[in-house]
Image: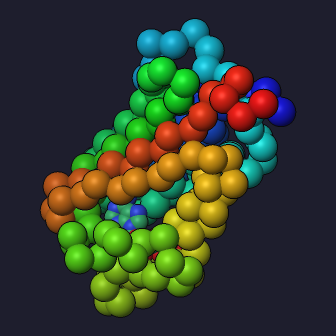
Amino acid sequence: REIDLVKLLENIVLKMDINAKNKQQRLSFKTHEQSVIGLIDQDKMEQVIINIISNAIKYTPENGTIEVFLEKEDDQGIIRIIDNGIGIPQKDIPRLFERFYRVDKARSREMGGTGLGLSIAHQIIKAHHGDINVKSEEGEGTEVIIKLPLKGQYV
Ligand code: ATP
Ligand code: MG
């Protein structure tokens, strides 16, 4: 399916703004592109983005910010979800995409969740021949980077 990532992200951010507002957080989406068309399973990709923005909201304190960016680079669409929340210790980053993996049991129990969100996101992105990476600094924030091949690459 040919899906416009600009529209997809706009709609999701609009929908999730209420969740951010409930935590006094600012959630924004920015892109310079008119449209970024990918061959994408819309429902699955929506699930991925919602998961990651939910994490950003969940693991960022009140008054924090969550920014979503979309760029086009060569034949790839690049989505970045950046928060200024609690961050993730370096040692945990390599294991984030494992099923049921959660950072630091104490803070995880407090927050609720199963530890499946990122592993499902990873599977879905792989099925789209894309890539997902996490950069984070404890106490500073987290950046999730998703790269997706655009229309024409795999057909
Ligand atoms: P679920 O998504 O199944 O409800 P979860 O959010 O704990 O549970 P994942 O989404 O897979 O599971 O995330 C794994 C772990 O990575 C989380 O437990 C959390 O500690 C950490 N994490 C994920 N995103 C962020 C983020 N934006 N900031 C800080 N920590 C994060
Ligand atoms: Mg999650």
- Observer-nearest of 107 and 5: 5
Q: Quadrant of ligand 1?
A: bottom left
- Observer-nearest of 99 and 9: 99
Q: How many marks?
A: 0
- Observer-nearest of 60 and 30: 30
Q: Residue furthest top?
A: 34
Q: Residue at x 41, y 45 (%)?
A: 145
Left or right of residue 140, residue 67 in this image = right
Judge whether 91 appears above or below 2 on screen: below
Q: How is the image coloured?
A: rainbow
- Observer-nearest of 23 and 116: 116
Judge whether 76 appears above or below 89 on screen: above
Left or right of residue 107, residue 132 in this image = right
Q: Position of residue 109 (x, y in %)?
A: 42, 87
Q: Dividing the image into 4 quarters, which one contains the C terminus?
A: top right
Q: Position of residue 17 (x, y in %)?
A: 53, 40
Left or right of residue 37, residue 76 in this image = left
Visible in this render: residue 7?
Answer: no
Q: Residue at x 48, y 70 (%)?
A: 97
Q: Residue at x 62, y 15 (%)?
A: 35
Q: Dividing the image into 4 quarters, which one contains the N terminus?
A: top right
Left or right of residue 3, residue 7 in this image = left
Q: Position of residue 118 (x, y in %)?
A: 52, 66
The quadrant holding residue 148 is top right
Q: Residue at x 57, y 46 (%)?
A: 130
Visible in this render: residue 76?
Answer: yes
Q: Position of residue 21 (x, y in %)?
A: 45, 44
